């Protein structure tokens, strides 16, 4: 024991500088978002300690496995029986209306009849914006005048969805802070009305989170979830952020799957979330097929 301790003690002392360099920098990484920048830094730390290029490769493979496990299985939207309802919620400017436009386009391409409800009656411009997306995607629209009760829009849209045999009714709501009690009550009312008017229809409540807000988005999600039974998250603006790793804590801490991701402002920039593809996209530089090593494309 004493001998082993002595040996260990000497090696430990000898490795002091390497260890300090490693652990101080590993500590810096703790608590940060898991993203490409994180991975690059981890790789650099391992290489600086001369652990060799093989070690970053092993670390990459292990990290991929951890990510895929943490992210769970793909969770597609529930769209049957028809008409299916999708309520789209979130704080201001996260990309709700844009996501609805893109989603309507995807569903139309899949030959589904889509009806959009402009339940953001806060500003007339909000319904105008949704109307433009309806035109682009070939969806129908129900709108009321500015300042109307959002639940009344939802009521009319539910009747229209039934009368016009819509396959999917998507409800656009006004951006709201999760801390505003009356606005959260308004959301609950919309949720109640649509369930009452379309009994038997599946209701997706999708929370739209702007990935660039990082951990803040997670705090929003907790509050929304306490108010409305969320069925999924849409993570937008992944194209412009180094914080894409926020997907992991969202999935794990909320227990709500990420269902869609927004990758730009265009009509085609929305994709179903695929955990395996996401882990690869996060860890593998563009153009390098998996397994070719971290700098194969450089
Ligand atoms: N880069 C990028 N921009 C996006 C994405 N999704 C939305 N945006 C942009 O984000 C801005 C806000 O989008 P909106 O769809 O109006 O957001 P909203 O949540 O409906 O906003 P409010 O209704 O005001 O709460 C617009 O400039 C969009 O083009 C995305 O995935 N990537
Ligand atoms: Mg909007």
Image: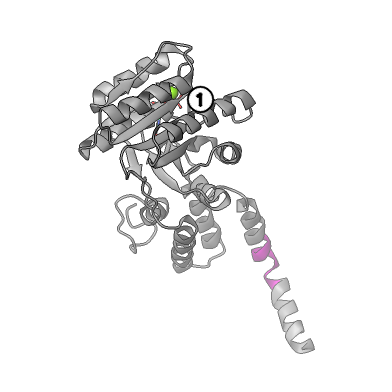
Residue placed at 52% from the left, 28% from the top?
A: 189
Can residue 76 be seen from the camera position used here?
yes
Circle 1 packing at 10 Å, graded few (<14), some (14-19), many (20+), is: many
Q: Is residue 109 positioned above or below 53 on the image?
A: above
Q: Is residue 80 positioned above or below 118 on the image?
A: below
All told, the count of numbered labels is: 1
Mark 1: C-beta under 8 Å from nearest atom of ligand 1 = yes
Quick one: SS at disc 1?
loop
Q: Is residue 199 positioned above or below 255 on the image?
A: above
Predominant secondary structure, magenta span: helix
Front one among 221 and 215: 221
Front one among 46 and 185: 185
Residue placed at 46% from the left, 67% from the top?
A: 58
Image quadrant of ligand 1 equals top left
Position of residue 140 measured from the top left corner of the image (x, y, whole percent)? 27, 24
Query: Which segment did they paint magenta?
Result: 14-20
Position of residue 281 measured from the top left corner of the image (x, y, whole percent)? 38, 51
Can residue 265 be seen from the camera position used here?
no
Residue placed at 64% from the left, 51% from the top?
A: 28
Inspect the magenta stretch and tell me whether residue 44 lies in it.
no
Position of residue 237 measured from the top left corner of the image (x, y, whole percent)? 43, 35
Say which residue label 1 marks: 175
Position of residue 119 measured from the top left corner of the image (x, y, whole percent)? 43, 22
Q: In this view, does 76 lie to the left or right of 5?
A: left
Front one among 89 and 12: 89
């Amino acid at each position: 024991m004493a001998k082993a301790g002595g040996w260990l003690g000497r090696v430990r002392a000898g490795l002091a500088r390497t260890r300090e360099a490693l652990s101080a920098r590993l500590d810096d990484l703790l608590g940060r978002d898991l993203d490409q920048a994180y991975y690059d830094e981890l790789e650099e730390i391992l290489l600086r300690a001369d652990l060799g290029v093989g070690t970053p490769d092993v670390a990459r493979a292990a990290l991929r496995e951890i990510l895929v496990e943490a992210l769970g299985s793909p969770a597609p939207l529930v769209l049957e029986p028809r008409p299916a309802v999708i309520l789209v919620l979130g704080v201001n400017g996260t990309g709700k209306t844009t996501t609805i436009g893109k989603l309507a386009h995807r569903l139309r391409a899949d030959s589904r009849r889509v009806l959009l409800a402009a339940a953001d009656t806060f500003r007339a411009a909000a319904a105008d914006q949704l109307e433009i997306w309806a035109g682009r995607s070939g969806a129908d629209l129900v709108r009321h005048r500015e300042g109307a009760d959002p639940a009344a829009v939802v009521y009319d849209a539910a009747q229209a969805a039934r009368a016009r045999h819509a396959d999917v009714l998507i409800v656009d709501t006004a951006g709201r802070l999760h801390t505003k009690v009356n606005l959260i009550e308004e959301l609950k009312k919309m949720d109640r009305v649509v369930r009452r008017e379309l009994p038997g229809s599946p209701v997706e409540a999708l929370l739209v989170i702007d990935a660039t807000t990082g951990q803040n988005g997670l705090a929003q999600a907790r509050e929304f979830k306490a108010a409305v039974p969320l069925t999924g998250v849409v993570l937008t603006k992944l194209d412009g952020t180094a914080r894409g790793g926020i997907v992991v804590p969202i999935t794990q801490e909320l227990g709500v799957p990420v269902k869609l991701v927004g990758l730009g402002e265009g009509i085609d920039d929305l994709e179903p979330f695929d955990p395996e593809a996401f882990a690869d996209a996060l860890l593998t530089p563009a153009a390098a097929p998996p397994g070719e090593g971290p700098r194969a494309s450089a």
